[in-house]
Image: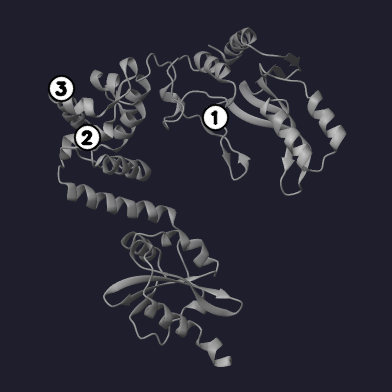
Amino acid sequence: MQKKELYNRLIDEYKQLPHSSYKATWTEEVESHCFGYSYNKDLSEAKALFKEHGWKSNPTLDAQYRNLNSLGKTDNIYITVLYNIAKDSISISLFSVGYALSYRKQRYYPVRKNIPAFCWSKHMYMFPMMQGKYVPRIQIGTIAFPMFPEYASKATEILMNTKANGSGFGISYRHYMNAKSEHEPLERYAGVKIPAVLKKSVYKHELLDLYRSLKDYNEINKICQFIAANPDAVKECSHGTGDQERISLYHLISHMLFGNYTYSWLIADSIADCKSLRERALSLKVTSLKRWQEEHQRRSRLRMLKGVANIKTADVYRNALEGLEYEYELIDDKERLIQESLEMGHCVATYANKINSGQCGIFSIMYQGNRYTLEVGKVDKYLCSIQLKGKFNAIAPEQLQYKVNYILLKDLLQTV
């Protein structure tokens, strides 16, 4: 069916939905229909408030504004559906008119904001906010509009010809187009039929993540067999009642491999690791807890490597510990920084940007058979110890702290 026909159907359906205002406009190139939010209010009370108190923030104005805001009387929300004849495209956006507070200036100001939500030109696009801007990205899942769920549902039904629900599972809209059941998009994505017992009893998002991470889809049958043979374990892993009862897949796999659900976190983390790395590598044939733990640690390190920038320590820190009597190492390599973070159980891997901007240098120190991580920074023109921590952020011994501070502050001490 042509887009214009679908657009006309959509507008006819939208006219039947609750709305407080409606306006249609036509030009030679564009047809547009605007629907007000069903609880839309005029802004007369907000206007009167600012006329009485002015725009500058003060306790009385702030209290009254918060009260109006809680009642939905400080802004109007509209949904605008547009068809561009020349481009043969359908676009939907939210339009907000009202008032807001500038925390930096401590003043209120009028707001008119157009928020793109959906566009169907050559492909279907959604508009997530990235670095302060609404950026077009291929539509994931079905169509969703904040504050207009009924309108989104109708757009999904008419434009995608499906009632299948799925907005947050990371599957392209192409898998949802013309789907006749809620699990059909997952089957299209995986390229295999999903066993009926799993469709009925497992959370959809967990099932999808498993298919994304499993090396051999045939191993899914091990889960089905375990469900059939272990009703008590299944009951222990279930949540909800009646039609809403679902099995936690992570609990279930932990039971199947290790005899209890204690390690469901390890299963969940391992699946998340594979998903993040876009790696189909899990095997349900592996029943060794140690192997799972080692693989989880390996993938966690790879995930950190993806997210941590290459580092280069400023020259001022390179000889900062010269003269220290204990063995030490300047950490000046991305992989070594991540290793320190993983092995020491703290967050020093997140300091890459601080290192690159010259705010700090990171050292690893051996003292009495234990390792400690030191962050060196600058106060005025002098180097000093910002923090010195052991494993899992344990406090370093006083003797070590004293020796480190003495070495770092020796130049300052010589001037006193």
**In this picture, residue 18 sits left or right of residue 74:** left
The percent position of residue 287, horizontal first and vertical second, equals 15, 42
Residue at 49% x, 77% y: name it.
317
> Is 259 placed above or below 383 here?
above
Q: Amino acid at mark 1?
A: Tyr
The percent position of residue 202, horizontal first and vertical second, equals 29, 25
Task: Quickly name the residue at label 1.
Answer: 125
State the count of labels: 3
Question: How far apart are the alpha carbons under marks 1 and 2?
Answer: 36 Å
**Foreground residue, 76 or 94?**
76
Task: Quickly name the residue at label 3.
Answer: 228
- Marker disc for residue 253: 2
List the single residue furthest toward the left: 229
Q: Amino acid at mark 2?
A: Ile
Element on which disc 2 rests:
helix
**In this picture, residue 161 sits left or right of residue 274:** right
Residue at 56% x, 36% y: name it.
128
Looking at the image, is mark 1 or mark 3 earlier in the sequence? 1
> Is 5 placed above or below 264 here?
above
Q: Quadrant of residue 233?
A: top left
Q: Amino acid at mark 3?
A: Ala
Mark 3, Cα crowd under 10 Å, few <14 / some 14-19 / many 20+, is few
**Foreground residue, 52 or 135?**
52
Residue 346 in sight here: yes
The percent position of residue 115, horizontal first and vertical second, equals 65, 31
Mark 1, Cα crowd under 10 Å, few <14 / some 14-19 / many 20+, is many
Looking at the image, is mark 2 or mark 3 earlier in the sequence? 3
Q: Quadrant of the C terminus?
A: bottom right
Do the residues bearing badges 1 and 2 touch, measured as CB atoms within 8 Å? no
Q: Quadrant of residue 398?
A: bottom left
